[in-house]
Image: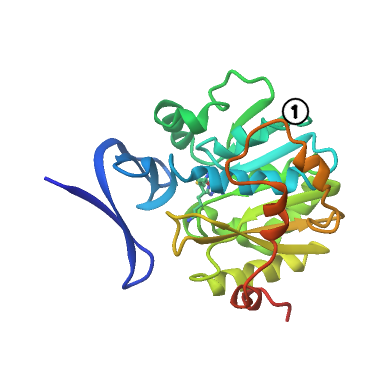
Amino acid sequence: MDLWYTEKHSENVGITMKVTETLFSGKSEFQQLDIVDTLEYGRMMLLDGLVMCTERDEFVYHDMITHPALFTHPDPKQVLVIGGGDGGTIREIMKHKKVELATLCEIDGLVIDKSVELLPSMACEIDGNNPRVKLHVDDGLAYIREHQNEFDVIMVDSTDPIGPAVGLFEEDFYRLVFGALKEDGIMIAQSESPFYHAEIQKNMYGNLRAVFPIVEMYQAFIPTYPSGFWSFAFASKKYHPVKDFDRKRAAARDFYTKYYNEDLHLGAFMLPTFAKENIAAK
Ligand code: AAT
């Protein structure tokens, strides 16, 4: 018998994939977690029935949430990730030898444990063996309140603005992030699909602009996320992701990136008109 997984992206549209095996299914204090194997996308993690990552296309998301900021900031040493319990973001950060310490603050310990067990290609740096990685199981909001003026880069690798992540899209949170960054710090946050989430983007970018002097949106192609057209927010105190980008340093990177490169760094900030309109300053 064929087993198919379907995620509805709107009332009338969805994505569907053939599933070969359910590897884990359980409920934490915060959400329903399922890890399944699929025929074409490899292992896939779902939270509350929504795709968080698949082995086949996670490289796009994890390259793009990390490298644009880490190649814009001239000297990123202390990095914080909020969410991201699958470990993909930390894995990419670890490729930057300048980074002395990356801290992961994930609200749901079950996501970390099951990723280490079942998604080793993503969770390879969060298994407790890397001294440059520190793990905290805590709400990102609570954590950041206690850690002001500490980080060069903060990456908000969070779920959509429902459930535990609602607060991570609000102005109060961005003020705390601003305070948790050093004077030239950069914050990156996944910022939903320009195609489907215009209203979320409008609010989110409005909130970011109320706090940060530099706010830009950039895009990436992620086949398993709604519409495949995804975005990230680049919010910064000092460095501009295009004007201050050191192309030579990015081109001279000493590690492989399957999606990111120095041309794409610049191209990703060029947006179609409808996406610009979503975040137009009032
Ligand atoms: N790396 C891509 C995977 C994710 S999962 C996002 C993680 O954020 C989840 O593990 C969730 O438990 C965690 N999270 C949610 N709220 C909080 C919070 N308040 N503090 C800390 N961690 C939190 C991102 C998927 C993007 C989905 C796009 N459709």
The residue that mark 1 highlights is 97
Kindly indicate the quadrant of the structure image that contains residue 146.
top right
Q: Position of residue 242 (x, y in %)?
A: 80, 58
Q: Residues within 10 Å of mark 1 (few under 14, many from 20)?
A: few
Identify whether 246 is placed above or below 78: below
Depth check: give the residue in front, 207 or 115. Answer: 115
Q: Residue at x 50, y 54 (%)?
A: 222
**In this view of the protein, can residue 189 be seen by the observer?**
yes
From the top left corner, tell me how far across and down residue 92 is, in percent. Answer: 63, 36
Residue at 74% in and 35% down? 253
Q: Residue at x 73, y 57 (%)?
A: 266
Quarter holding residue 96: top right
Between 199 and 4, the residue placed more toward the observer is 4
Taking 250 as reference, is 197 left or right?
left
x then y, percent, for residue 160: 50, 58
**Vertical relation: 209 (above or below) 86:** below
Three-letter residue code for mark 1: Lys
Say if 177 sits above or below 171 in the image: above
The x and y percentages for residue 231 are 59, 60
- The quadrant where residue 33 appears: top left
Look at the numbered disc 1 and give the secondary structure of its residue: loop
Q: Could you tell whether 14 is left or right of 65 in the image?
A: left
**Screen quadrant of the C terminus:** bottom right
Closer to the camera in the image, 177 or 6: 6
